[in-house]
Image (spheres, rainbow, N blue to C red):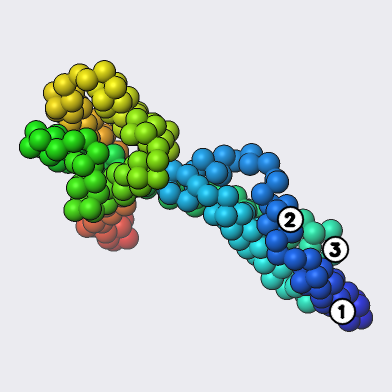
Amino acid sequence: MKNSVLIPTFLASLGSITLALSASPKVEFTQRVARSKDRGSVQNRLREIGEGSPEKFEDFRSKQIFKSMLAGLFPTFTLLVIGKPILLICLVTILISAVTYLLIDKDLSKKVKKHQLAVESEFPAIIEMYSLALSAGETPLTAMERIGATATGSMAIEFKKVVALVRAGEPFHVALDAMGREINSIAIRRFVDSLIIATLRGAPIIEVLQRHALEARELQRNRVLGAAAKAEISMMIPVVFLILPISIMFALWPSLANLNLFSST
C-alpha cells in the first residue's frame, strides 16, 4: 500500500520537474548558471585547459548539475520501490547528488593537473627549439609561429594561441602575458616575464632562453627523481605486506609441520 502511494507521487513529481524544465527556455537556464557564483574557481581551471569561454563554463555547470540530479534520481526510485522511509530517501539522494557534484569538480582538477604536467614536460624541448630558431635569425613571433605549426603537444597549442592573439591585434607582450597567466606554472611564468623584458628593452634573448632551458631541464630532472622516490615507496608496500609474509610462512611451514608431528607422537 505504501509503495502504491509513493511511486505515483514520485513519478508525478518527476513529470512536473520535466515539464518545468521543458517550459523554461534553455537560454534562461544558462543565464542563471552564468550568474551563479564561481566558488570553486571553475573558470580559472577551464581557462588553463583552453576552455575559458563563458559558453564552456555554462556548459560545464549545466552538465554538472544535470549529472548530479540524475545520479540522485536512480537510488531514490530504488528506495521508493523497496519502501524505505522518506527521511532516509532524502538523505541518500542529497548525499549521492553532492558526491557526484564533487567528483565532477575533482575530475576537472585532474584534467588541469594533467595538462600542467604535460606543458611542463614539453617546456625544455620547446624552449630549446625556440632558441635555435632565434639563433637562425627569425623574429620571436615568427619562431613561435613555426614551432606552433610544426610541433605537437600542449605547449605548441599555447604558442598557437599567442600567435592568434597577435594576429587579432594584441601586442606581442600582452599575448605572452596572457599565456603566462593561463598556465599555472612558475617556470613558464618566469620564461614569459624574461621574454617580455628582453623584447621590450632589447636585451639578448638567446642567452636568456638557454638559461631557462637549463633550469627547466634541472627542474624536470628533480621532478622525475621525486616521482621515482614516491614510486619506490609505493612498491615497497606489496613487498612488505604481501610477498614477505608469504615467504616467511613457506619457510616456517615445514618446521611447524614437523613440530606438530612430533607433538602428536
Please say if the residues under marks 2 and 3 sit with CB atoms less than 8 Å apart.
no
Task: Determine contact: label 1, label 3, CB under 8 Å.
Answer: no
Foreground residue among 233 and 75: 75
- SS assignment at label 2: helix
Q: Which mark is residue 94?
A: 2
Q: Is residue 50 left or right of residue 105?
A: left
Q: Select label 2 or label 3 by which is in front.
A: 2
Where residue 76 sits, quadrant-wise, is bottom right
Q: Residue at x 30, y 26 (%)?
A: 196
- Label number found at residue 86: 3
| Marks 2 and 3, the one that precedes in the sequence | 3
Q: Residues within 10 Å of mark 1 (few under 14, many from 20)?
A: few
Q: Residue at x 57, y 55 (%)?
A: 55
**Label 1: which residue?**
8
- Of labels 1 and 3, earlier in sequence is 1
Residue 216 x, y percent position in the rendering: 21, 31
Q: Is residue 92 visible?
A: no
Front: mark 1 or 3: 1
Asked if residue 192 shows in the view, the reply is yes
**Contact between labelled residues 2 and 1, with CB atoms less than 8 Å apart:** no
Q: How much space separates mark 1 and mark 2, taking CA atoms? A: 21 Å
Mark 2–mark 3 distance (CA, rounded to whole Å) = 12 Å
Q: In the rendered image of this protein, does residue 28 appear above or below residue 218? A: below
- From the viewer's perspective, is 105 left or right of 131? right
Say which amino acid is labelled 1.
Answer: Pro
Outermost residue, front side: 169
Q: Amino acid at mark 3?
A: Ile
Q: CA distance from mark 1 to mark 3?
A: 14 Å
| Amino acid found under the numbered disc labelled 2 | Ile
Asked if residue 88 is positioned above or below residue 172 in the image, the reply reads below
